[in-house]
Image (spheres, grey):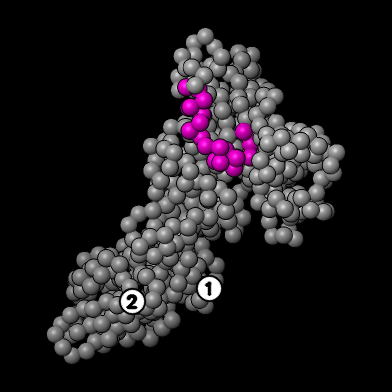
Amino acid sequence: MFSVGLVGVTGHLVEVEADLAAGLPAVVISGLPDSALHEARDRVRAAIVNSGQRWPNRRITLNLLPATMPKYGSAFDLAIAAAVLGGSGELPLVPLDGVVILGELGLDGTVRPVRGVLPMVAAAARAGRDRVIVPVENAAEAAVIPGIRVRAVDTLHRLACFVRDGSPLIEPPATPAPPPVDGPDLAEVAGQALGRRALEVAAAGGHHLALLGPPGAGKTMLAERLPSILPELDDAAALEVTALHSIAGLLPPGGRLLRRPPFQAPHHTATIPSLVGGGSGLARPGAVSLAHRGVLFLDEAPEFSKGALEALRQPLEHGRIQLARSGGGTEYPARSQLVLAANPCPCAKPAGDAYCECSPLARRRYLGRLSGPLLDRIDVQVKLLPVRAAELMEAAVASESSATVAARVATARQAAAVRWAPVGRRLNAEIPGPYLRRPPWRLPARDTAELRGRLDSGAVSARGFDRIIRLAWTIADLDGRPRPQREDVLEAIQLRTGEGA
């Protein structure tokens, strides 16, 4: 029989062999199984007997190929049961020739859903298989993959009847229409023209964003509305995101592709494994991977542990996270937009106001929890001022909606995608710095004089220089210019340093 094993988000076709020989009754499983797979022998035996089939009292050797690849989880149960019944002569397995079988067995013979069905079925398609049998709860999810004939089972007895008598299996349900988009709108944000501009630039270029300011300035409101101005995911990105959520067991009912950019907002008490991934056995994806192609929002960022914040530096730079464990390593994509929000001091009262109870040293120590190397990877860093009464009362009339801003963001992203198509990139934030410093994309010296002066004086690092140039390209795309000008570079410096807020 054939099944699929997962290592991270990558699936591999697994051949399940069963050999029944004379000797003392026993079941031996080989092929680097984990604890859950070792326990399959008891689950499979009970499921076969309670489904009205005969359990062969012989020495049964089960081998999962390739034997050098670790196998995790219970998704092999149904394939193991079919191999045992075929080897004992209970079932003729011709109808299952070349079919990929996935599913966990309960003791009563029910077939239970498993995590990661979508990347498993995608791996079967890449291996040239065109038929899969999955648990009925996973049927809609599996049917998302094109070119695959999906059938579902709810019990082992139904599978046996299909093999023996040709009884039909369960068809996957029709894909329901996507629900209407209903979420927070940018029009609800009062004032904060600089914050709105920073949010729009971050969305258009895929840049990381830090929002600093007193409570009530709108930091959280702005961050929560960033997904509403991002374009919907294309087919490739939607498959990546849906596969990650499938592995984590977080897919909503219905089995649709996730088209909206995900939004993850972990609490400040989150541990390092919950942010970057971890767990016993095969490491599970963390919040930074679940936010892939979307937004990872860290509210009250200085309250996060130093180790948790520093663990984000490598994924922010490379767009992926590599997790090494004693049982094997795995890699998850992690190309998310990081948004940090922070108050100016522990007491969180207006800066410079007579009500603030913090000394200058306490203020420096508080924001110093965000390390320099981490902030150096944040493209846009703006300081928000308190909202004035006039802005608060006139917000409903003066503010643009998310739909209006999203249209500009989509146009800017399309311009960047066309420009960077020859190098296989789509967003300005993804372009390597050396590429922007060489012709034909190097900006004239007169336009970058201020920026080069800051680099020479040490006010801006080399990484910061490249990130400001990327910001300038995004600003030009939003304003409809083919190349950045001096004004774009100056605005990019302001967005990077927070000056002039």
Residue at label 2?
A: 31
The kind of secondary structure element at disc 1 is helix
Who is closer to the viewer here, 226 or 451?
A: 451
The residue indicated by pointer 1 is 126
| Mark with earlier residue (2, 1) | 2
Identify whether 497 is placed above or below 37: above
Left or right of residue 315: residue 306: left
Residue found at the very far left of the displayed protein: 24
Membership of 365 in magenta stretch:
yes
- SS of the residue at dot 2? loop
Compute the Cα span from label 2 to label 1: 22 Å
User: Is the N terminus in the top left, top right, bottom left or bottom right quadrant?
Assistant: bottom left
**Number of residues whose C-alpha sits closer than 10 Å to that of mark 2, classed few (under 14), some (14–19) or many (20 or more):** some
- Residue that protrudes farthest toward the front in the picture: 457
Q: Residue at x 43, y 36 (%)?
A: 304
- Dot 2 amino acid type: Gly
Q: Counting other residues with Cα less than 10 Å from the Cα at mark 1, is it few (<14), some (14-19), or many (20 or more)? A: few
Residue 448 lies left or right of residue 301; in this view the side is: right
Q: Is residue 496 left or right of residue 476?
A: left
In the image, what residue occupies the spot 68% across and 53% down?
432
Q: Position of residue 21 (x, y in %)?
A: 22, 89
* In this picture, residue 164 sits left or right of residue 378: left
- Kind of residue indicated by mark 1: Arg
Give coordinates of residue 195: x percent, y percent: 63, 29
Q: Nearer the viewer, residue 11 or 404?
A: 11
Name the front one of labels 2 and 1.
2
The span picked out in magenta is 362-381
* Residue at 82% across, 54% down: 439
- Nearest the viewer among 365 and 146 is 365
